[in-house]
Image (spheres, rainbow, N blue to C red):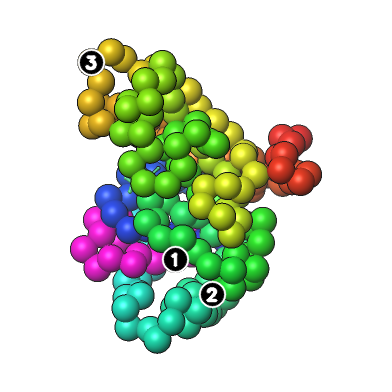
């Protein structure tokens, strides 16, 4: 069975969507550990409620980003994690971590990449005046929101949208898309060919 390690920083609604699909038997996988870089992240409570091991690892307690990432890798190795899922994890993984889990790290970003990478993509979309936006599940590489795209979901941008209303609409789409991408991975149906991910 596929073993997943999840990295979180905040509310964890994407984590919840993934847990729910696993518990419903729609994804053949188990979440082995959830790690947060923020102690107060509600995502840790969600994991605990479902009996999933959860840890707060304080990045500031390490001498370097590399040492912090070595700790993450060590924990994931102990749990025999096959796939790392970044679910609202507000940090960029460095070359060490990416190298250890190359092509086995997924991220979700609330825009239609390559448009609006980085912070507050929903606000960037509104300010640009686009008519549709959405979310992208992709494999993480060394860049920011640049890795091979697995799935994208589209939502309309309405004239009177605020950052909050657009974020909420995109988040609902995220909750459909992220479990679907993990399901495809768990079934061995994602094939990376350069920048492209073929769905078998
Ligand atoms: C999501 O919009 C995700 O795409 C972004 O941060 C948000 C996290 O939401 N990177 P949650 O913690 O999964 O509720």
The residues tagged by marks 2 and 3 sit, at their Cα atoms, a distance apart of: 44 Å
The residues tagged by marks 1 and 3 sit, at their Cα atoms, a distance apart of: 40 Å
Mark 1 / mark 2, whichever is N-terminal: 1
Which marked residue is nearer to the observer: mark 1 or mark 3?
3
Determine if residue 45 is in view.
no
Give ligand 1's quarter of the image: top left
Q: Quadrant of the C terminus?
A: top right
Determine if residue 146 is in view.
yes
Please tell me whether residue 35 is drawn above or below residue 88 in the rendered image. Answer: below
Q: Which residue is mark 1?
A: 33
Circle 3 Cα neighbour tier, 10 Å, few/some/many (<14 / 14–19 / ≥20): few
**Quick check: 85 left or right of 171?**
right
Q: Nearer the viewer, residue 82 or 196?
A: 196
Q: Nearer the viewer, residue 34 or 70?
A: 70
Whether tag 1 and tag 3 are in contact, CB under 8 A, the answer is no
Quadrant in the picture for residue 102: bottom right
Circle 1 Cα neighbour tier, 10 Å, few/some/many (<14 / 14–19 / ≥20): many
Q: Residue at x 32, y 78 (%)?
A: 60
The magenta region covers: 31-44
Q: Residue furthest front?
A: 128
The residues tagged by marks 1 and 2 sit, at their Cα atoms, a distance apart of: 12 Å
The local secondary structure at tag 2 comes to: helix
* Residue 15 coordinates in the image, percent (x, y): 39, 49
Q: Residue at x 59, y 68 (%)?
A: 95
The local secondary structure at tag 1 comes to: strand
* Residue 33 coordinates in the image, percent (x, y): 44, 66
């Amino acid at each position: 069975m596929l073993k997943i390690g999840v990295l979180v920083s905040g509310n964890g609604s994407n984590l919840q969507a993934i847990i729910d699909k696993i518990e419903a038997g729609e994804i053949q996988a188990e979440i082995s550990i959830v790690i947060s870089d923020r102690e107060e992240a509600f995502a840790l409570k969600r994991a605990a409620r479902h009996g999933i091991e959860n840890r707060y690892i304080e990045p500031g307690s390490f001498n370097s980003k590399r040492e912090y990432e070595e700790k993450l890798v060590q924990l994931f190795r102990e749990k025999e994690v096959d796939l790392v899922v970044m679910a609202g994890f507000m940090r960029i993984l460095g070359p060490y971590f990416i190298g250890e889990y190359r092509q086995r790290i997924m991220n979700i970003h609330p825009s239609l990449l390559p448009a609006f990478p980085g912070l507050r993509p929903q606000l960037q979309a509104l300010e640009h005046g686009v008519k549709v936006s959405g979310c992208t599940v992709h494999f993480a590489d060394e860049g920011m929101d640049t890795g091979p795209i697995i799935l994208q979901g589209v939502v309309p941008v309405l004239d009177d949208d605020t950052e909050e209303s657009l974020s909420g609409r995109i988040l609902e789409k995220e909750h459909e898309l992220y479990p679907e991408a993990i399901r495809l991975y768990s079934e061995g149906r994602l094939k990376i060919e350069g920048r492209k991910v073929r769905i078998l």
